Image: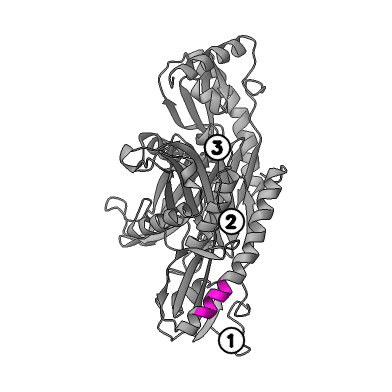
Amino acid sequence: MAEMVPQLLRQQLAELASQDKRFDGRGRWDSRDIILETDILYNAEGSAKVVLGDTIVYAGVKFDVASPYSDRPTQGSLMTGAELRPVAHRKYDPGPPSPESIELGRVVDRGIRESGCIDMESLCIVPGEKVWRVMLDLHVLSDGGNIFDACATAAIAAMRTAVVPAERFDVGEDFKLDVSSTPIMCSYRRVGGRYVYDACEQEEIGGDERIHITLGDKGHLHSLQKGLRGVLSPAEFTEILAQAGVRCAELRELVHSKEA
Amino acid sequence: MGGYGDVQLMREDGKRLDGRAVDEMREVEIKAGILPAAEGSAWVKHGLNIAVVAVYGPMEAHPRRIQRQDRAVLDVRYNMAPFSTSDRIRPGFNRRSREISKVTAEALESVVLVERFPRSKIRVEIEILAAEAGTRCVGITAASVALADAGIPMKDLLVGVASGKIDDIVVLDLDKAEDNYGQADLPMGIMPNTGEIAFLQMDGDLSPEEYELATEYNFKAAHEIHGLMKQALLDSASGGEV
């Protein structure tokens, strides 16, 4: 029974795709409505909430003072964690982090880290002794599909509005975390044989592999990830990369519009 | 209580540090039906606390050993988000959240008509997004609204409230400073319609007279919050804010 429903759904999605239609009536590259709010959690030094269709996620940034890695005595560090807690969907069980949540945290982390938007040297307090550790936590409250883009958008918005609580740690004055650019992720899913942007829950259940692309301010790629079973052609990638360029620019503008 | 009596919590004018009267509660805001993936859900802001609750089920009780032939079990998880407190919390269960989950489940099982759903379980996921003293009570209030939003039959909406003692004075609804430096804390889960108590904890030091007064404050506040809970459910049912 559990296997039959996706099979029927797959047939339906294939039929819709052959008529260039989607499950919820959107065009192939259309997004669901997205709402972004920043600075909304009282105890987090940076926070953001994203509502993307039926998906709701929070990102929170916390800081602490730690010893630097011995090979990088003048650099702070970034740690990203994602929680797919049972609150978010019937399908999630309590317990240690699942492979899916680890992948989610790491893909979001790579996009931010590899874009070089965080100057790790600016997070040094005393070389070789004390540095700031940035802890970015992603908290999914409702999984209605495409949690990757929701988390990545919330993550960069929370980072860009974060304030380093130096006064609380007695190491100088509070200062704004320096985030020099705005890496943005766009995710594509093969549904009914072709790629679509921002898959909804049903498209994920009845779909195949997914591709996550993170682009920087200048349109450079900073992180790529293919997840789940399936293959794609170079031509297909070229097509979604072009789409990602357009959509990332829109999302970057949204993130910038929520900065005080 | 972490109180040592060395921090003054009452002002000269008889008000508390945040300007509240002794029997004045922090502001409470409640929304029902806010999580699309869940069967029932609620969002409660109480002072600076924020709790979000999702309810799933009734569903088959797994693992098998938790199943009861004659009633449903409530599978309650109380969890604080890593960014909910001043120092980041390591994700995952700890002893405190396990205990709160257990007593909250037992309190909710006392108000849900569990006999209606033999051999099943109802999952209640309490997520604390921001914490500023009194999160277990906010969790109970939010869980009741989420259960009602999921259409689970209950005897009453259980309301979480707390009173305590600061500078030898009984006060309603402790904030963070009062919780840290006060002398007692008395969290309760109250059923306003029947006047019964389904959740009860206490720590610190209270005389029997002080307990009576604290309970009186709790019941008064519970009636107030009860009204807000019902209004949130009405708003949600009539297609209010999601």
On the image, numbered disc 1 is attached to which residue? Answer: B11
Instruction: Classify the position of the N terminus of chain B by image quarter.
Output: bottom left
Task: Name the one closer to the observer, B180 or A180.
Answer: B180
Q: Residue at x 66, y 35 (%)?
A: A33
- Find the distance from the CA under tag 3 to the CA under tag 1: 47 Å
**Given this view, does label 2 or label 1 mark the residue nearer the observer?**
2
* Chain bearing mark 1: B
Which percent across, then down, holds residue A59?
51, 48
Q: Position of residue A160 (x, y in %)?
A: 55, 50
Name the residue beneath numbered marker 3: B37
Vertical side of B184 occupied by A138: above or below: above
SS assignment at label 2:
strand
Q: Three-letter amino acid code at disc 1?
A: Arg
Contact, mark 2 vs mark 1 (Cβ under 8 Å): no
Evaluate whether residue A243 shows in this view: yes
Q: Which residues are magenta?
A: B212-218
Quadrant in the rendering for residue A127:
bottom left
Task: Using the image, tell me which numbered label, if any, was put on residue B181.
Answer: none
Amino acid bearing label 2: Val
Q: Residue furthest bottom?
A: B12
Q: Which is the main secondary structure of the residues drawn in magenta?
A: helix
Answer whether residue B217 is magenta in the image. yes
> Which of marks 1 and 3 precedes in the sequence?
1
Q: How is the image coloured?
A: one colour
